[in-house]
Amino acid sequence: MSRVLMAWELGANMGHLDRMLLTARVLRRRGHEVVFALKDLSRAHGRVVGEGFAVMQSPIWLPRMARPPGLVNFSAVLASAGWLDPAGLAGLLSGWRTLFDLCRPDLLVCDHAPTAMLAARAYRFPVAAVGNGFEVPAFGDVFPALHYWDAADTAACAGSDATVLRAVNAALAALGQPALPRLTALFADVLCIVASLPELAHYPAYPDSVVRVGPSFVDDAGAQPQWPQDEGEGIPVFAYVSPEHADFTALMAALRQPGLRSVVHAKGLSAATARELGAPNIRFEPAPVRMDLATAQARIVLSHASIGTVSAAALAGCVQLVVPNHMEQYMVGRRVVEAGIGLMVEPGSRGTDYPVLLRRLIDDTSFSAAAMALAGRHAGVRPDHTGVQVVDALERCLAHGAA
């Protein structure tokens, strides 16, 4: 039927690849040819090539900004991808154009691939942007502030967009392409699909033109969680946290308190540290565990507010304690608090009394009531169905483009 090019440019984790595969499998079942252009090919063989898909390397920006400018919205993400360097951006655009000429797609699907979207403006095939609410941001005449609740940042958004737009249009002029009328036209002129529960999307409001589908994450892979048995009826806590976090030791101390029993996955935690921080009511799982089973059995989920973990916990009706590390996670953490389903510890906080926070989540029934209500509103939502929803929207886009 149609050849679909799926492009990934930005972002460091494998959630992009997982989401792309969910969509690609459905596309192939419906008779479409799928080709991948990936930022990171190091794990592509077993996960993509092994399933029979062709892969190519995405053009990506390698230099680091020595002095990032004070941009307050999605323009900061674009700046980190080389969009403040007209000559460098022109090189990336040329790379994408060559890739398009070689692949000759009927549809381009971008998973956090804004430079591919910009390059595609020179072509006639339709384009879709698929991602969570950070990767496909809210937009209007300008991109809203990442700190959308901050009046000063909101006032600075137009200036942030203008700073990046000047460099973008210089790059486009060097390639003989028309100027971008405003930075948000990058998303306004394509099909935008946000894969997120509305309550947890990074921004509270998105344009009506945005297609909303369910969250995308893998929850049925990994080991079966083994809960400590000696603690009887202790409240089950599932913790998915990094041992590199500044408060990791304090978090483990909080989980050692009586009345709790915890399963902890902390990637890279040494056996010696696990012995040092462990207790009879804590089980450290060295390998990832099945998220569906862990959240179904837990009452509290402790995480860094990655959108996949937070979504899985929300769908299971768990209350949450989140300790975000960076801006994207912080935005999700705020949404957890706004939804009333948990508590957040601000990045950089010191001296946090984690036992008090856990006790509050247990004793204040408003958290569990809000969590169960949210889960009830989305009963039956499954991440494996998100791929079907995305492909339904993509096929409507293809049909419209062919008309």
Image: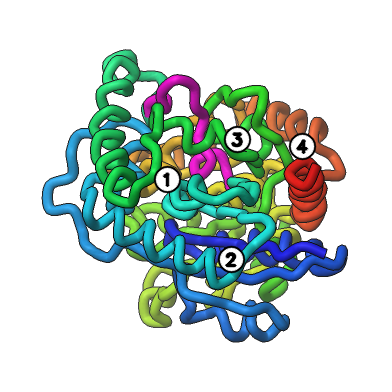
**Residue placed under numbered mark 4 in the picture:** 375
Look at the numbered disc 4 and give the secondary structure of its residue: helix
Image depth: mark 2 or mark 1 in front: 2
The image quadrant that residue 28 belongs to is: bottom right
Chain-order first, disc 2 or disc 3: 2
Q: Amino acid at mark 4?
A: Ala
Q: Which residues are magenta?
A: 131-145
Look at label 2 and name its amino acid. Leu
Q: CA distance from mark 4 to mark 3?
A: 12 Å
Q: Are marks 2 and 4 in contact (CB under 8 Å)?
A: no
Mark 2 → mark 1, Cα distance in angstroms: 25 Å
The question of residue 133 being in magenta is answered with yes
Of the numbered discs 4 and 3, the one sitting upstream in the chain is 3
Determine crowd level at label 2: few under 14, some 14-19, many 20+ residues with C-alpha closer than 10 A. many
Front label number (4 vs 3):
3
Name which residue lies at 59% across and 39% down: 190
Q: Which residue is mark 3?
A: 200
Residue 196: x and y in percent read: 65, 41
Residue drawn where x is 54% and y is 72% of the image: 102
- Classed neighbour count for the residue bearing mark 4: other residues with Cα under 10 Å, few (<14), some (14–19), many (≥20): many
Q: Nearer the viewer, mark 3 or mark 1?
A: 3
What residue would you read off at disc 2? 17
Vertical placement of residue 55 versus 87, above or below: below
**Helix, strand or loop status at disc 1:** loop
Count of picture labels: 4
